[in-house]
Amino acid sequence: MHERTESPEQAGQTLAASLRTAYPELSWSKIRQHIAARRVQINGELCLDPARRLKPGDTVTLLAESLSVPKAHREPIVIRHLDPHIVVVEKPAGISSVRHPAELQWTRERRELSPTLQDQVQWQLAERFSVKMHQLPRLRIVHRLDKETSGLLVFARSVLAERVLGQQFRRHTVLRRYLAMVEGHIEPQTIRSFLVRDRGDGRRGSTMHHSQGKEAITHVVVVEKFPSHTLVECRLETGRTHQIRIHLSEAGHPILGEKVYVDRPKDSAEATTQRLFLHAIELGFEHPEAGEPMSWTMQLPSDLAAFLKSVSSQ
């Protein structure tokens, strides 16, 4: 595996051009073959678009072996609620919620090489109703979950739902409850900060200057303490990108499996969990048309449940 980080001078290059610069011994056709063979990542995410433009701080990785098609692509997505306005689903870990803007014009054949949750759900709905894709209302994005985060997610299926749900998210009236396993022993607390896209090293992070970032508030409740870990429940008052991951890491208790917001080698505790131990366990809001309160809960998926059981038996 080879890895490089784009400097400000190199930003704006296409992915193919960046790889050609890094590996001059590889021909343009060979570079494109590596990308098509699922061997290239940007910031840890598979990228199949050789024309994708890079930004300062982007990390490009050329893998020794091709990534397999995600398991989520081969298994149906669990749909918890469906009506003309919304669809609530259980997102598996390992699949992106939505597609990168640079990939929106991809054909279905190309999307199937790296499907998103949005793709998967729409394909399933087309099969369920025996209709063509263009006959379905498009799925509108009102929130996201990180690729390695599992849990409940809602898509809007109408303009009304997109508008009303968007208002609820902006007013912070949507119930979003997560379970996370963190390192060490953290105390119950409310974490408040202002998140910025770049804290100075190319990563998102906090500042205490409200004029420079967006307010982020996370309420942390201790569920259970173990010898070297704590199972916590996090309730989002705001929903910024990577908010829980950043807040817990900056509090000195990164989530097990965290790879971005840690500045030290993995210890044995981190190595025992295969992916980020973060799960969106509850989602609740008012139905955008009827106005009635609705909520769903989702149990821990089998991988996280097995890890929790192993920790509990120690």
Image: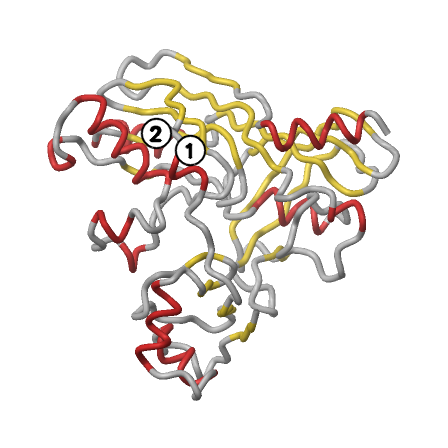
Tag of residue 169:
1
Q: Residues within 10 Å of mark 1 (few under 14, many from 20)?
A: some
| Residue nearer the viewer, 192 or 117 | 117
Residue 31 placed where, x, y %? Answer: 37, 75
CB atoms of marks 2 and 1 within 8 Å: yes
| Residue nearer the viewer, 76 or 195 | 76
| Residue nearer the viewer, 105 or 40 | 40
**Can you say which quadrant of the picture contains the N terminus?**
bottom right
Residue 37 higher or lower than 12, as above or below: above
| Residue nearer the viewer, 166 or 269 | 269
Residue at horizontal 47 percent and vertical 40 percent from the top: 145
Amino acid type at mark 1: Phe
Residue 38 higher or lower than 219, as above or below: below
Residue 173 placed where, x, y %? Answer: 46, 26
Residue 272 higher or lower than 158, as above or below: below
Residue 314 placed where, x, y %? Answer: 86, 29
Residue 213 higher or lower than 42, as above or below: above
Residue at horizontal 73 percent and vertical 48 percent from the top: 271
Residue at horizontal 51 percent and vertical 68 percent from the top: 61
Residue 202 as seen in the image, left or right of residue 254: left
- Looking at the rendered structure, the secondary structure element under dot 1 is helix
Amino acid type at mark 2: Leu
- Looking at the rendered structure, the secondary structure element under dot 2 is helix
Tag of residue 4:
none
Disc 2 marks which residue?
165
Residue 40 placed where, x, y %? Answer: 44, 65
